[in-house]
Image (spheres, rainbow, N blue to C red):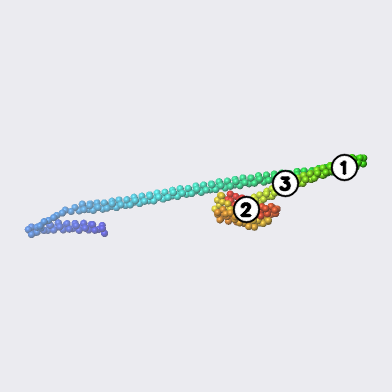
Amino acid sequence: MRSYLVPALLALLVHVLVLLLLAGHWFDHADPRELRPRHITAQMVDLGAISQAQEKQKDDQRKADDARRREQERLEAEQRRAQEQRLTEEKRQQEQQRQQEQKRQQDVAAREAAEKKAAQEKAAREAAERKRQQEVARQEEAKRQEQARIAAEKKKQAELEAKRKAEAEAKRVAEAKRKAEEEARRVAEAKKREEQKRLEEQKRQQAEAERKRREAEELARAIAAEERVAAERAAQQQVAQIGDYINVLLQRSWNIPTTARNGMVAVVEVRLFPSGEVDSASLVKSSGDPGFDDSAVKAVLRADRFPRVAEVDPLTFERSLRRFRVNFRPEGLRW
């Protein structure tokens, strides 16, 4: 609508100017006195200049529109570049965070691997130490048996020696009696002296025999004491072996929770039947983590039975295995 309005106004203006020019020509033939106007104002209109002005105005408008469009495009391009830079920076930060998280996970994995290796090395050292202790115990047991054999041989030799001496003494006494009787028949006084001497010698021999009997009894008591000590040592060794055996079964049945940390300790009291079956398991000292405590109690109940306990003699069982406590640690079980 705007494009037709301007040409229409220009055309109307041109027609008005033409009419004014023609009207002046028409009124020139009239009486000058009657037709002369009071004053006349004439204005020349350059249509080409008007058209150029209109064209210039359009060009200016078009240039302004182009400038606004270019400015808008420039602003949009800057916004796109800023958005691309922001997205690039966000991607860079996300990549950096991903790399940091990956490195942290690698560090955690390396640390866990190192801890696992250290635990394995510790377990290997403990196993070697147990093996060494078992070897020492075996050597001590062999030494004890050898000592018992030597003691038995000494006892037997002592008994044989005592018997031999007794027999020799009996022969000597008989011979002395025979000589004394012969001498008594010859000289009565000599008989009395010999009889007195014999009685003194008999008392001395009886005292000597009593002394040897007491020494033999003391030796027998010492041997019995050594045998009791050896028996107690064997029982302790058996209890230690059964303890290692129970620790292995409990370790297998224990599902250590993920919340476990080094330094945590849960103490569980275990009661057994003579057959090795678990009578009860109760928590006597908490680690501070209910899940960790519950896993320790469940480990005992899950194990259910320790068959080798039935091999232990009743006295050792009542002393050491009827009731005992186990320390559950992430680093390993301890009695």
The nearer-to-camera label among 1 and 2 is: 1
Name the residue type under label 1.
Answer: Glu
Please give the label number shown on residue 252.
none
3D distance between C-alphas at marks 1 and 2? 74 Å
The mark that comes first in sequence, 1 or 2, is 1
Does 268 sit left or right of 162 as displayed?
left
Crowd class of label 3 (few under 14; some 14 to 19; many from 20; radius 10 Å): some
Query: Is 98 or 299 nearer to us in this picture?
Result: 299
Q: Which residue is mark 3?
A: 226
> Element at badge 2?
strand
Asked if marks 1 and 3 touch (Cβ < 8 Å), the reply is no
Element type where label 3 sits in the image: helix
Q: Which mark is first along the chain, 3 or 1?
A: 1
Is residue 64 found left or right of 322 in the rendered image? left
The amino acid sitting under disc 2 is Arg
Q: Amino acid at mark 3?
A: Glu
Rendered position, 322 above or below 157: below
Decide: is 229 above or below 12.
Answer: above
Specify the farthest residue to the front. Answer: 189
Q: Which label's residue is closer to the chain start, 3 or 2? A: 3
Give the x, y percent position of residue 145. 73, 45
Q: Of the residues tagged 3 and 2, which is closer to the observer?
A: 3
Residue 222 makes an appearance in the image: yes
Q: Is residue 232 left or right of residue 178?
A: left
Could you tell me residue 312's position as x and y percent?
69, 53
Q: Tag 2: Cα neighbours inside 10 Å, few (<14), some, or many (≥20)?
A: some
Classify mark 1: residues with Cα within 10 Å, few (<14), some (14-19) or many (20+): some
**Residue, disc 2:** 325
In this figure, which residue is indicated by the disc labeled 1? 195
Residue 316 place in picture, x, y as percent: 69, 52
Q: Is residue 308 visible in this depiction of the protein?
A: no
